[in-house]
Structures are given as structure tokens and as C-alpha cells.
Image: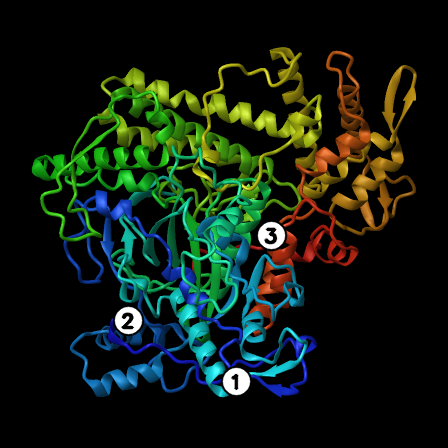
Amino acid sequence: MVEQQQPLQQEEVLSSSSSNLQKEATTTFNNQNYMKADYLPKILESLQFVNYFTKELPSDPTKLNYVRQVPHACYSYCKPSLLMKPIHENVTDSTSFLTYFLNLQERKRKLRDASSDDSSEEDNNKNNARVTPFELIIASNEVAKDCLQQSLLPKSNNLNETLLSHNNTYITKDDLQYFFLQKLQNDNNENITMNEEMIKNNQEKIQLFTNYLCGYETLENTIKKTKYYAHCYAGHQFGYFAGQLGDGRAINIGQIKLNHHSSFILDNNDDNNRDSNTNMESRLSQQEKYNHIKEEDNLFEQVFELQMKGAGRTPYSRNGDGRAVLRSSIREFLCSEFMFHLGIPTSRALSLVVSKDKVIERDEFYNRNIKYEFGAIVLRIASSFIRFGSFEVFLYRFTSSLMESEERREELKIIDLLVDHVIRHYFPHLLQNSGNDKMISDSKNDKDEFSNTKKIVKSNLSLTVKLEWAKEVIRRTAKLMSDWQCYGFVHGVMNTDNMSILGITIDYGPFGFVDYFNENFVPNFSDSEGRYRYANQPEIGYWNCNKLIKTLSHLFPSEKMDDEIREQYWKHYNYFYLFTMRQKLGLMPNKELMIRKKNLNRLEDYIVKEVKDENMFEGDSERLRKLDLELIKDLMNWLQESHADFTLFFRLLSDVGFYYTKKEENNIVDEEFVNLMLQKTLPQIVTTCQRSVCSSDTVEGTTVDQEKKNGLMNWLNKYIKRLNSEEIKMEMTREERKERMNEINPRYVLRNSLVHDIIKEATEGNYESFYEYFEVLTDPFSDQSSERQEKYGRRVPESKLNIKLSCSS
């Protein structure tokens, strides 16, 4: 239990909003063969925790949870905390900055007292009354299957999954109400009325599941197979070293390992209480449908780290409260899953829960307009949340001449330990041909199964292995930057503490996707100088890699090795950028080369081998690559000048094969197609030309400068010429090319303008648009319904452009 508080109980039966699913009761069903919710908390309780990170790496010896510097440690143990209602008698949506400032210290003191072990029973009772409960908004069934090998959906003879009012890739609070707290039908289609005892049991299990997701109940207390912790790391922020940072509002539940050959998958059949070894053969057959579960995948242990963002303060919270608000949590949940379905390596989002009260104070735009907002927690999952800053934190401490001693050497040793840990668990393919891949450990004192009592005292990893690892980290980062650029993603805060050592996208803050193309697009309200603008991301990726190389330089005996590592970046960024852009433009000669790998979830999927032959297909050459890069550069220049919609332009381009005619030995694009592209992708700016001779055309309400129209026509003609080049024989019909291009260029993109409206509805308790947009973004390459195309697939109105986001989340 968290902070010695009693488990929260839901005070009332959840009301239903799924009226179309309700049925009239005709009989009372009193036996034990009813739909039980017991399996929900068991999904988390049955996880196989391995916690290699905490077992193998040094921990913070101080167990108390207070803000401090944490030397010589990779993490600190800490527990989630209860979210308390404000001390004030009268809670309003806003308060003056002066009142906020004057009461800040008093509120902090009282909150510390509220969680103190020395608090009296009377104080604890008062504090219990101030606790605000959390409720489930959404949990991803797809993520549960991919990362936990579990299904969130109940399966029973009494339930048909088609009764869901949405697709079965996720569940909501309303689904749980319907499954477990309402009238159901039995096998004879007779209506069932659940009695109070049945409802109470299910209600308690649903609340326990929700409490696990928000940290009010911990697996540390119930199954005692893990201990919650926060990562220690540092980072360069906006170009300057910021010192120790760490997980200020992220608390890690632990690391789990997927069990390939056991009854680990729950199929939730029958009464959910059968023996775990029953029907093993049928369960193993279920596992075969997960493509990452293969008997030959013994090289890679599929390990995932579970992390709650917004669960309370940690030793690294600095001046923060350790919380996250609903608006930023909705954005992270949507974007992480959208990126996954684009095929860009990313952390995943399992669940999103929200507080029932507005209790978190935020000054969103740092203008002293402080408001109370809903708290929220995202349970996010990645193979690891180790980042560049996890290494950097040990380089810059104890650097003064007076402190250059054992403490400094101790810090550098931890970098070596961390490198070994990362290679062994996340880059095991590098050890395949290495005979020195065994870890030497001291196991004399193995009393604590969670901590690093089995501390590594020596590593046999060769210099060659470490060098190849460093090179691959740089290659992965370069490829990730190319993915971001090709799909218009702008991270917003590319500090080194937000750069994953695995080359995946993590820490979704003030991000954005380019709408009307602008290479200087900056979604972050705080980035006034545009350091992390769209056009600068590849350079920043290289800058961050240099900081990592500097941190690792003591591992490599010569500057030549550092340069060898550094050279990996631009070579591979340029290669992957051209490769993906060729796919987006349909310039690959055959269908096989037009397949983009999606649904990256396994450690194997993140491997980026060194490119030694830059030819991407038969007949490719340096001359052709230069021509294609020039074609791409000309397109990006036109997009910049015209501010066309980035996503819609590439999607519509797939139709070009149906809109050109032969003219004097050349293929010329039809003006109809040019007008269509302009109409669909350019900003809607309606103006009236007062001159007798006007230098612009009006295409259905969009005023187009004639020069921009001519520029697009000229580029399209060059593009068509390249498609029909005799030098490279295209083996696809125009229909096949359109199909392949549409599998690479999404029909939908996450737009901040749409999310802004969704967040506004969500703060009023309406999540219908959120659910619908989530379905859209998790199937971004399909056209979907005409209603969804009209609602989510159009260009952004001028009035909603340039939405800025802050880090105050």
C-alpha cells in the first residue's frame, strides 16, 4: 500500500453510458458462473519481473524519498504517492500568483506531513478524505498483447466481443461497466441480473486494476516481486549541461520478461479461476499468433520496462510536484501509439487514468495564470528507458582538481558497468561472435533479490564489442532522425536526457507534426530561438551523439576511434533519409522495395546494421542518387515557399499516374491534377484581386500565386520524367504504385489543432472524440469512412495554425 494508506474503494456503482448495450432483466443469476473481473488485476500480478537494471547496477543507498543529489547510483527506490486535494477550503480554477507563492511552502509542508509515517490516526483520516481517486479512460489491448502477452478483454460464453461499441484494440471505463456491472445474457439468451455481492466483487477488482495503473496500489506490496524506482540521469538542455535531472515524475514498476513457453498468456475463459497449467497446448497455440514469440528467438530476451508518468515525487523532482496533467497525458498516449503505427521506433502507452478532481496547479504558459487541472497518469512501456543522459550524469561530477580522486574514478566505473549492462541485454547480437561475453559477478551477499547485491566487479567485454556498440547507437539515432524528418515529426525538446540509447522516440512533451510545411516549425513555446525546429533536428541529433561520444571516450584509447564512431552518423542519416523519401515518392522500381517495416516492438527490430553498399536497388548509382536528392530538395523548397500541407501532399501524390498525357515525346502533368493538389494542400486564404490583371489563380477558395502554381507544375513534370525513366525500369503499374505509396504515406496525421479540441472535450468529461481519434491514428494508412476523412483528414484551418505547447505538463 502506498504511504500506509488504505486501498481506495469506489463509492458508487459506475453508471453506464452505453445505453444501446443494456438489456432488460428477466431472471436473477445467483450462482458463481457469472462474468468475473478477477482477471484484470491478475494481468499485472502475473507478470514475470526480472529487474536486470536494479539487480546489476548500483542503487542509491538512501531509501527516503526527498529531493537530493544522488552520486554513484543509476537509480533510487521510491513509491508512488497519493494525489491530494488542495489544502484550501474553496477550490477555484485559478488563483493569483501572489497567493500561490505565499502558500507554496505551507502546502509542501502539509503534504510532507500527510505522507509522514509519524502522522497520527486522526491526521491520516483527514488526509484520506482529501485523496482524489483515479478512474480509467483507456487501456490498450494491443499494447497488452504486444508487451505483456495478455488480453484485456474478457472472454466467455456469455460475451460476444462484437458487443463493443468500438474496435477491440482497447477498453474503456464504459466497457468495464458493461462487462462486469450490468445485466448480461447467459448461454440460453436469458437476461441476467447480477446481485449486490457479484457487483461488489467486480467493482473492487476493477478499482484494484485502476489503482495498480495509478500507483495507489503497488505490485511491490501485493506480489512482492519488484520494487519501484526512478532513473538517475543528467543532460544537456538547450545546449548547456544542466546537471543531475532524473525521473522527476516517472516511477518505474520494474522490468518484465516475456515468457515464450509457459501459460503466461491469460485467455480469460470460463470462470477465470482455472488452474494455470490447464490446457497448456491450446495456450501455446495462441502464442503463435504473436510474431515476436518464436522458439528460435533465444538470442534476444524480450524485456520491457513499465513506467508510470505522473505518479508523484521522486528524489529527482527538483521543484516539481511529480505529477502530469490530463492535456499532456492525452497527447503522449495518442502520439506514442500513432508513431508505433507509422513504423517509427517508440515507447508504447498501455493505459491512461485521470483524477476525479481538478487538483493540480499549473501555470501553462508561465504568465502567472495558475489554474487547477485534472491529474493523469500514463503507463508507458519500452524495452528500456536508459538514455544518453544516463551515461552523462557520471562524467561531469567531481571534476574539480580538489575532487579528482576516488569519487571521480567511481563515477567513471559506473559508465563502464552501464555500457556492459546495455550491450548484454539490448545488443546481444554483438556478442554472437565474441568469446568473452560472460559477466563476472560477486554473489557472496545475495540477500536482496531486487538490488544490485550481485554487483558486477569486472567485465570481459572486448574493446571491439564496445566500439561496435557505440557505432550502432549512432546509426540508430541517425535513422530515427531520418524517420522524424520524413514524416514531419518535431520532438520539441531534443535534450540529451530525452535521447534513448536504443534509438527509439521517448518523452513526448511539446511535440508537433508539421501541418503547412515550414522548415522553421517549432511546437515548443519555450524554444524562442528555434534550436529544436524541424530543419535543425538532424544537426541536433549529431550534436547529441557527440556528447555521448565524449562521455564514452575513456573507453576508447584513441581519438581515431571516436572519429570512427562519429562518422557513422551522417552517412547513415543520408542513406535512410533518401531510402524513405524514395519510398514516399514511389521511386523504388519494384513492390518489394516499397514495403516499410511497421509495428516495431522487438529488440531485433531496432537493429541498424552498417550500410556498406549505398546502392538501394539494381541499377542504382551515385549519379541517380544525386538526381533523386536534387528532386527531393526541389520539392522541399516548393513546399517551403507554398506552405502546402506536408502529409496531404505526399498522400495525394500517389494519384499522379492517372493525370498526365504524352506531349512531344514527354509526359506532361494535367493542369486538373495541379489544381487538385493546390486546392487540397494549400492554406485557405480568400482574397479579392482588385487589379485588371491578376498574377494569381483562385482554386475553390484558395488563392494561389501563379509562380507557385508554375513551380508545382514544373516539379511534377520532372517527377513524372523520373518515374518514366528508361534508365530504371519500373516494375509496377500505376495502380500498384499508388497502393504502395499509400502504405507509406499516411492518410492521417496527429494534428495539434484537433488534439486541442479533444482535450477541451475531455476536461468536460467527454472522451468520445478521443476514442475516435485514437482509432484513426492507430490505422493511419487506411482511408477509413468519409465522415472521418472530413473530420480528421482535412488541412488545418488558418485560425488554428501555429498552436504552441509548453513543458508545463
Q: Position of residue 509 (x, y in %)?
A: 46, 52
The kind of residue tagged 3 is Asn
Q: Which residue is mark 2?
A: 1
Which disc, if any, is residue 802? 3
In the image, taking residue 195 as reference, residue 122 lies left or right, namely left
| Disc 2, SS | loop
When asked about the image quadrant of residue 383, the answer is top left
Q: Nearer the viewer, mark 2 or mark 1?
A: 1
Quarter of the figure with the N terminus: bottom left
Residues 803 and 427: in front is 427
Residues 160 and 16: in front is 160
When asked about the image quadrant of residue 9, the answer is bottom left
In the image, taking residue 329 as reference, residue 741 lies left or right, namely right
Q: Residue at x 57, y 49 (%)?
A: 338
Total of numbered circles in the picture?
Answer: 3
Residues 489 and 696: in front is 489
Mark 2 or mark 1: whose residue is earlier in sequence? 2
| Disc 3, SS | loop
Q: Residues within 10 Å of mark 3 (few under 14, many from 20)?
A: some
Residues 566 and 302: in front is 302
